[in-house]
Image (tube, helix red, strand yellow):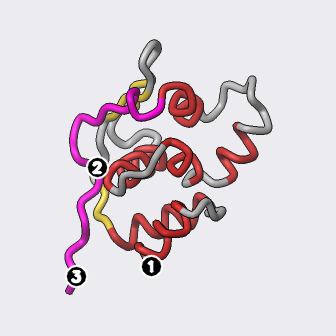
Amino acid sequence: MLNHFIDRVKAGQVVDFQETMAVIAAAYDYQPTEFSNGIQQPLVNEAGCNEGSCKIFAFARLHGLDQTQTLALFGDYYRKDVLENPDGNDHQNIRNFMRDGWDGIVFKGEALKAKHAG
């Protein structure tokens, strides 16, 4: 499931947010973790806040996904809410990542740990 999902993302196939969350939940244990997003005006996300973004950024970093592949993991939040409303102020984590990419992401710990088989 995990490898197939990663292959689909790397191939540019459309995935949705709920599918991304399900794949992460199946393969990883999540620990709420503070992270900041952005270079000039970083958005500080306290542990337990914006957990979807936290999980996606941690997952994408673990799997070496690039900026485009990472944004795709947000599904319609990225494709519809952000791209169709470029001047909006919602989904600030997505918007900051679009602007600053991986250079703007700083974690204060390890949000995801692989679940052990068995």
Residue 58's spot in the image, x, y percent?
35, 49
Under mark 3, the amino acid is Ala
For the point 25% across and 66% down, the residue is: 114
**Do residues under tags 1 and 3 come within 8 Å of each other at their CB atoms?**
no
Q: CA distance from mark 3 to mark 2?
A: 19 Å
Q: Which mark is residue 1?
A: 1
Q: Which residues are magenta?
A: 101-118
SS category of the residue bearing label 2: loop
Q: Amino acid at mark 1?
A: Met
Q: Is residue 29 left or right of residue 50?
A: left
The C terminus is located in which quarter? Answer: bottom left
Answer with left or right where residue 67 lies relative to residue 116: right
Q: Earlier in the sequence, mark 2 or mark 1?
A: 1
**Residue 90 occupies which quadrant of the picture?**
top right
Circle 1 SS class: loop
Q: Which residue is mark 2?
A: 111
Residue drawn at point x = 63 percent, y = 64 percent: 13
Tell us which disc is closer to us: 2 or 1: 1
Q: Quadrant of the N terminus?
A: bottom left
